[in-house]
Image (cartoon, helix red, strand yellow):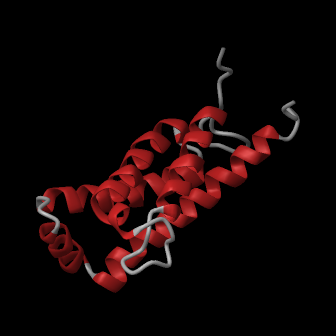
Amino acid sequence: MIKTSTAPYAALLLRVSLGVMFLAHVGLKIFVFSIPGFVGYFGSLGLPAVVAYAVIALELFGGLALILGLYAPWVALPLALEMLGTIVLVHGANGWLFTSKGGGWEYPAFWVVGLIVLYLLGDGAMALRPQRERA
């Protein structure tokens, strides 16, 4: 049974916490690894530089959109796809535990689940974009 009186606040908590995590994640890329360092890392994976820049933009603007509640369910989908990409291209071969050398895939998988749950729940309370009921 779903507590309809508190579900919008559950979506708010999930939305804001995921948004903050994405801002922290992109901050690591920008301020610790540096943008050129991150682009170089993507090159070492055989990916074009433009993909690295797209990931930075997605995490930055996606994180802000989640926090503010701007089309959060629709922002959650490309972010979930990005996290699936990190599992396939980066963390999948390192094992399950994120404490494994190179980081396993448990943490990105948890993000994927959280993002899918947010997609299913909707924007939640205090979103800048009012939520419409879905059938």
Percent coordinates x, y for residue 105 in the rendering: 45, 63
Is residue 87 shown left or right of residue 44?
right
Residue 26, how many percent across, how many down? 40, 69
Residue at (44% x, 47% y) in the render: 80
Front-lying residue, 88 or 2: 88
Q: Quadrant of residue 34?
A: bottom left
**Above/below status of 124 relative to 30:** above
In the picture shown, does residue 118 fall above or below 104? above
Instruction: Pick the quarter of the image with the N terminus.
Output: top right
Q: Quadrant of residue 81?
A: top left
Label total for image: 0
State the image coordinates of residue 50 (x, y, percent, origin top left): 15, 57
Image position, residue 123 (x, y; %): 63, 39
| Residue at image point 13% right, 62% down | 49
Residue 130 to residue 93: above or below = above
Which residue of the protein is positioned furthest toward the bottom in this rendering? 32
Q: Is residue 95 left or right of residue 127?
A: left
Direction top: furthest residue:
135
Quadrant location, the C terminus:
top right
Q: Where, by quadrant of the figure, is residue 73 drawn?
A: top right
Q: Is residue 70 left or right of residue 26?
A: right
Q: Against 103, is 7 above or below?
A: above
Which residue is drawn at the image coordinates 70% and 40% (left, top)?
124
Residue at 73% from the left image edge and 42% from the top image edge:
125
